[in-house]
Each structure stands twice: as structure tokens, then as C-alpha cells.
Image: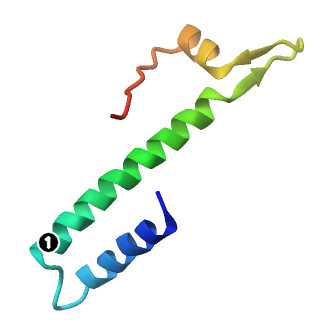
Amino acid sequence: MTDEKVARINELYHKSKTPEGLTEEEKEEQATLRKEYVAAFRRNLRNTLDNTVVEYPDGTVKNLKEVGMKHAKIQRTDDK
């Protein structure tokens, strides 16, 4: 997600709080941009978690994915 798109999300938010509000086209644009932002956030978080390791006191290092799958029932939802 580019800085310009984030700025546009903020611009639309502030405009929505004014008495004039948003037009229908702007509401659709806002919804589309928000969905895109959330998808980018989830991809970034998933990438961060996939590259996180756990170091145990005995010095062994395991990928968080391995640890999580053994100790918790974590379901992965892929963004499309």
C-alpha cells in the first residue's frame, strides 16, 4: 500500500466527518481502499510471523510456525 493511498484513506475519513459527508462514489472508494489496507496489513503481519523464531533456554531455535502448530491450533487464512 502506497503512502498516497494511505493519505487518501485519511482524507476520505476526515471528509466523512464534515457536514457535507461523502458521495456514494467516495464511499465506495473508501471501502475499497480500506479492504486493500487491511489485506496489506495481514500480509505484512503473516510475513513477520512466518519469519519469527523462538529460542529456547537450551539454545535450540525453532521457527514460530513449528512451535505454534505443536502447541496451539492455529488456522491460517490466506488473503487472495
Please state the horizontal and vertical placement of residue 4, each as a whole percent of the image: 46, 71
Snapshot quadrant of residue 16: bottom left
Q: Looking at the image, how many numbered discs can be counted on the residues?
A: 1
Look at the picture and state if 55 lies above or below 44.
above
As drawn, which residue projects farthest toward the bottom?
19
Residue in the picture at 52% in, 34% down: 46
Residue in the picture at 72% in, 24% down: 53
Q: Is residue 47 left or right of residue 14?
A: right
Q: Is residue 7 left or right of residue 30?
A: right
Quadrant the C terminus occupies? top left
Residue in the picture at 24% in, 89% down: 18
Q: Which residue is labeled 1 in the image? A: 25
Please state the horizontal and vertical placement of residue 64, each as a whole percent of the image: 65, 21
Please state the horizontal and vertical placement of residue 50, each as a whole percent of the image: 60, 27
Look at the picture and state if 35 lies above or below 64.
below
Question: Colour scheme used in the picture?
Answer: rainbow
Give the camera-side residue of 25 and 17: 25
Q: Amino acid at mark 1?
A: Glu
Residue in the picture at 51% in, 68% down: 3
Q: Is residue 15 left or right of residue 42?
A: left
As drawn, which residue projects farthest toward the left?
24
Please state the horizontal and vertical placement of residue 60, each as a whole percent of the image: 84, 12
Q: Is residue 54 left or right of residue 49?
A: right
